[in-house]
Amino acid sequence: MEIMKTIYKYPLSEAVQMPKGAKILTAQDQGGQIFIWAEVDSHARTDKTREFLIIGTGQELPNLDNWQYVATVQQGIFVWHIYAEINL
């Protein structure tokens, strides 16, 4: 059976439920809220929790060895840097 892919949009929080193997594409502000877009298997169950870090410019960074940069989002006077936990 061929795997069909679809791009889904999710509201960003520190933990987001999405299908296993979802490929994070970007994060952007839309209407004052930050969303992430991910390429997912259209038929996969949404049973995986992906963890995200949302770090403001000037904030101290934690150890980012297991995190991948996703995007920088400007929201008014704030600038956020989004990282997704690497699927190990």
Image (cartoon, rainbow, N blue to C red):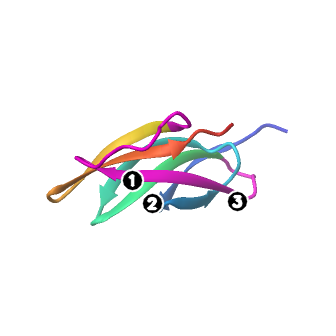
Residue at mark 2 = 12
Q: Nearer the viewer, residue 52 or 34?
A: 52
What segment carries the magenta color? 41-67
Q: Are marks 1 and 2 in contact (CB under 8 Å)?
A: yes
Q: Label 1: how many residues lie within 10 Å, few (<14), some (14-19) or many (20+)?
A: some
Q: Are marks 3 and 2 in contact (CB under 8 Å)?
A: no
Q: Are marks 3 and 1 in contact (CB under 8 Å)?
A: no
Instruction: Answer with left or right where residue 54 lies relative to residue 76.
Output: right
Q: Earlier in the sequence, mark 3 or mark 1?
A: 3
Which numbered disc, 3 or 2, marks the residue closer to the eye?
Answer: 2
Query: Looking at the picture, does residue 79 appear above or below residue 69?
Result: below
Residue at mark 1 = 54
- Residue 44, image x and y in percent? 75, 52
Query: Is label 1 in a helix, a strand or a loop?
Result: strand
Reply yes or no: does residue 65 show up in magenta: yes
Which numbered disc, 3 or 1, marks the residue closer to the eye?
Answer: 1
Q: Nearer the viewer, residue 65 or 73?
A: 65
At horizontal 41% and vertical 57% (from top left) the residue drawn is 35
Tell me the amino acid under the disc marked 1.
Ile
Q: Work out how far the residue at label 3 is from the one at label 1, CA to CA, in angstroms.
A: 22 Å
Tell me the amino acid under the disc marked 3.
Thr
- Residue 87, image x and y in percent? 65, 40
Residue at mark 3 = 46
- Residue 20, image x and y in percent? 71, 48
- Residue 29, image x and y in percent? 30, 56
* Quarter containing the N terminus: top right
Q: Work out how far the residue at label 1 is from the one at label 2, CA to CA, in angstroms.
A: 9 Å
